[in-house]
Image: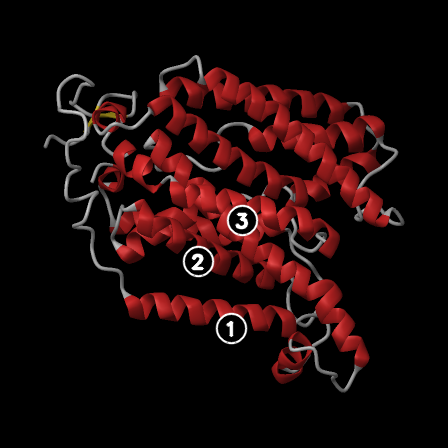
Amino acid sequence: MSRPENSGGQGYETTHRPDSPERGTAAPSAVRTAMPVLKPVLIAALLMALVVMFLTTLAVGSVSIPVEDVVRVLLGHDVARPSWTRIILDFRLPQAITAILAGAGLGVAGLLMQTFFRNPLADPFVLGVSSGASLGVALVVLAVGGVTTSFLAGLGLMGDLALAVAASAGAAVVLMIVLFAARRIASGMSLLVLGLLFGYLTSAAVSLLLYFSIPERIQAYITWTFGSFTGVTWGQLVILGPMIAGGLFAAFLLGKPLNALLLGESYAFSMGINLMRARFAILTTTAVLAGTITAFCGPIGFIGIAVPHLCRSLFNTADHHQLTPLTMLVGALVALIAAFAASVPGSNIVLPLNAVTSLIGAPVVIWVLLRRQNIKESFSS
């Protein structure tokens, strides 16, 4: 079976045509059953690392709490200091759960986009969803200015909810435009360019709002763009959790069309995949994951682009039935590590989360590029 070839800027096109192979032809062994066997020891090590980081995130901070007391609090028992229970349950536990959900969601969304566009540089925000969310927040913080988030003193929960609603509305508007365009644009590359143009348009609008805003509102907006897992409350997790869980479940169900798309849309069509329905499902799932996370946590970069590459390299597989859960696991672990590093244990300093994720993500991508010089193999086998 012929393999996808590089076609000079139009993505990796397959030599198959919709009318060449028989519909229902068996998929190549590289995408079907001959994928490498997963490494159980490595998976067990990652699971153990996730548990260790979860407990460490709950135990270490400006106030250090013994791990055994953390476990007692999680089991519902009393500890020596009642304040520890409040610190863990009201602040650190929601932050840790948010990091796990956001890391898993961003990693999977990045995997979907890299496969859909067969582009190793694609990330969850390539469709412009993050830019739409940023515009919604900018309109609230910069133009309205009456309600903002907790980083403006004294506003508390209402500010957090206002930003979440504004970001969700902005992301939803861009999502509707992208889905409308996806039904009328056959080329994935054209859709990619369209998403980039949406990003430029919203960035221009945000720049104008920044130019005419007062310094206090500008600072509030810039702080939101840093990204954070700390502002999500239990009440917001009731919305965030089911949305991300639904998106992750939908992504897992998309394993077959994603595997077929690795060899190009023509081959996927020959396998009996409804391309329009698959495109709509992939774009919707990605937008829901990216838009929801951006609404509650801000625009968090680099996890979505680095984690899929890390998983492909660690497990040497391109099968999305395997890659999707592995990406959830590694994404959650990376997000917890980033959240832990951003909190600067032992101090009251909190670093910008986006800076930390970039410091983690950039070396990973560089390492993958140096280790696998022909990276397009991950998108054609």
How far is disc 1 from disc 2 in space, using C-alphas? 13 Å
Location of residue 74 by image quarter: bottom right
On the image, numbered disc 2 is attached to which residue? 329
Instruction: Tell me the amino acid under the disc marked 3.
Output: Ala
On the image, numbered disc 3 is attached to which residue? 245
Mark 3 neighbour class, 10 Å CA radius: few under 14, some 14 to 19, many 20 or more: some
Viewer-side label of 1, 3? 3
What SS does tag 1 mark?
helix
Where residue 143 sits: x, y (%)? 81, 26
What SS does tag 3 mark?
helix
What SS does tag 2 mark?
helix
Q: Earlier in the sequence, mark 1 or mark 2?
A: 1
Q: Earlier in the sequence, mark 2 or mark 3?
A: 3
Location of residue 72 by image quarter: bottom right
Q: 218 above or below 153? A: above
Where residue 276 sits: x, y (%)? 38, 22
Instruction: Tell me the amino acid under the disc marked 1.
Output: Val
